[in-house]
Amino acid sequence: MRPESDEGAYRIVARREFVERLRDRGFQISTAITVLILVGFIVAASLFGGGTRFDLGVVGDVARTTGEEVVATAKLLNVTVTVHGYSTVAAAEAAVKDGTVDAAIVDDREVIVKSQPPAQGQQLLAMIQAVTSRERASSTLQGAGFTEEQITSALNASPLPIHELRPLDQRHQEANAVVFVGVLALYGQLFAYGYWVAAGVVEEKSSRVVEVLLSTIRPSQLLRGKILGIGFLGLCQLLVIAAVGLTAAQVAGILRFPAGAAAAIGWVLFWFVLGFFFYSTLFAVAGSIVSRQEDLQATMTPLSLLIIAAFFVGITALQAPDSTLALVASLLPPTAPLAMPSRIVLGEAPVWQPILSALVSVAATAALVPFAVKMYSRAVLRTGRVKIRELLRAERRPS
């Protein structure tokens, strides 16, 4: 006996897909691994990403005074410098050789380093040279008879003001970071859940369960229910990952929760829904034209390449949201889910663009679903690999 309505039928299928996938051990393990990796990354960033740190050795009272000035200068640059005192030059050289300190100052004579350091180490040397140059200039001015006030005024002259065309907004940057993580997650979810739709179709087809199911419901009800159930599960998984990640980041103290971050998460989830429904209908067709899991990869390759291309376009939109490529990509259904969230959060998308993009995606999916249902219904009961041309010709033949 068929269900009374399409709504009742696909709800039953959606509930079945959601519950069965949720109970799947592979889904539970993959979700746990994703959460553990995310939390581990956040904890590692908290422990080892707390800013630049240097160790500085000093020999003699003059060097110790210089070291204190370097520490004060470093604080202004959000750099931590720890001073270690040594009684002899030999002890300081040994500390530099074994890596205990990054550099050592010997009185007012020289600075000892193991070798010319890379860019990050150059920052320590630059601070030492700036402090010692200031001290030598002060001594020279004192010898020339200038007063302390004149020396201080000359050495503390205000630098040229900096005019920022795009001032750095820390909260804006945090929201941008959330979008970057969201784009990565979205890329993975589109792959994973699109594959689940295709693999589920192949599994039902190879086990002939689909024949039993189609004796009670229509192909359109089965397809829509499968997409809805798996899509809702994917949305729930993204919500869990986002909640755990933000909570861990706040506890670790490496991320505030700006309003922009909440909006960024909302946009990512919204575009996941649009992107998933667009791609999942195509993945369902890819699964319906083969009868074995071994053949599925070949039929999924074009869709996989399309998602990979969309991902790289999304990264480009994150780096250059005002570019023509980012604008065009954010309006096209295949690439919009991975390009538009970045442009919205970075303030490069006027209000009309997200609205237009969403409408285009919804319209494209609405036009694609009937086509996918027809392809699915004509292919799902056939054995072996079916060519799309055969399905199109079958569609044109009168029933």
Image (tube, rainbow, N blue to C red):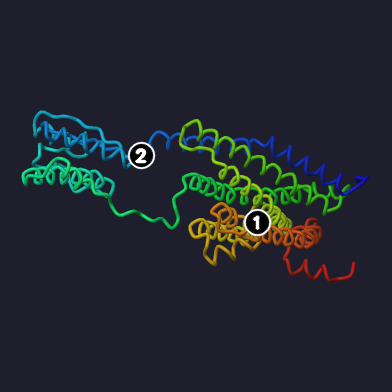
Front residue (pair 85, 305): 85
Q: Could you say where residue 345 lies in the image, as x and y percent from the top left?
A: 56, 51
**Is the residue marked by circle 2 packed among few (<14), some (14-19), or many (20+) residues within 10 Å?**
few
On the image, numbered disc 2 is attached to which residue? Answer: 51
Instruction: Check disc 1 and report its element: helix, strand or loop.
Output: helix
Instruction: Check disc 2 and report its element: helix, strand or loop.
Output: loop
Give the position of the C terminus as an image quadrant.
bottom right
Q: Amino acid at mark 1?
A: Asp
Work out whether residue 210 can be spotted.
yes
Evaluate if marks 1 and 2 touch, with contact meaning CB atoms under 8 Å apart. Answer: no
Work out whether residue 382 can be spotted.
no
Mark 1–mark 2 Cα distance, whole angstroms, equals 50 Å
On the image, numbered disc 1 is attached to which residue? Answer: 295
**Is the residue marked by circle 1 packed among few (<14), some (14-19), or many (20+) residues within 10 Å?**
some
Give the position of the N terminus as an image quadrant.
top right
Residue at 60% x, 45% y is 265
Front residue (pair 80, 291): 80
Q: Could you say where residue 357 lies in the image, as x and y percent from the top left?
A: 66, 60
Question: Where 185 falls versus 254 (above or below)?
Answer: below
Q: Quadrant of residue 263?
A: top right
Q: Amino acid at mark 2?
A: Gly
